[in-house]
Image (cartoon, rainbow, N blue to C red):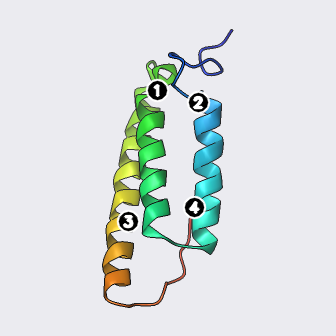
Amino acid sequence: MRQDTLPAQPDTPSLRTLQAAIFYMMSHYSAHPCPCLARAIADHLRMFAGHPGNADCPMMRDICEKLSRYWRQEEEEGARAASQGEPDSPVLVH
């Protein structure tokens, strides 16, 4: 079987499961921006980057690490805006 379909350890989600979760959360975030959701996206991107199924793809790891940092910034900015009582601003997700 392919490595991207089987988890490396019993508690490690498959790459496909991580991809589905990331896509779902990004879609949800575009409609309902929330710092907690941005943090979850960043965490899942880091899991995806470090997944054993990506061991032979440094470009994918690099992209996911960069995206994870971007989503951490979204989390921080969203938390800062919420603490200052600013309304949610529209978010574009590419």
Residue beneath the point at 48% across and 44% down: 44
C-alpha distance separating marks 4 and 2: 20 Å
- Which of pointers 4 and 1 lies earlier in the amino acid sequence? 1
Secondary structure at badge 3 equals helix
C-alpha distance separating marks 2 and 3: 24 Å
Q: State the mark number for residue 94.
A: 4
Q: Are marks 4 and 3 in contact (CB under 8 Å)?
A: no
On screen, residue 23 above or below 78: above
- Location of the C terminus by quadrant is bottom right
- Which of pointers 4 and 3 lies earlier in the amino acid sequence? 3
- Which of pointers 2 and 3 lies earlier in the amino acid sequence? 2
C-alpha distance separating marks 4 and 3: 17 Å
Instruction: Name the spot of residue 78 as percent of width and height, x first.
Output: 39, 74
Q: State the mark number for residue 75.
A: 3
C-alpha distance separating marks 1 and 3: 23 Å
Q: Are marks 4 and 1 in contact (CB under 8 Å)?
A: no
Q: In the depicted view, which residue is nearer to us: 94 or 76?
A: 76
Instruction: Name the spot of residue 38 as percent of width and height, x first.
Output: 45, 61
C-alpha distance separating marks 2 and 1: 7 Å
On screen, residue 45 above or below 33: above
- Which of pointers 4 and 2 lies earlier in the amino acid sequence? 2
Dot 3 amino acid type: Glu
Secondary structure at badge 1 equals loop
Q: Which residue is mark 1?
A: 51
Classify mark 3: residues with Cα within 10 Å, few (<14), some (14-19) or many (20+).
many
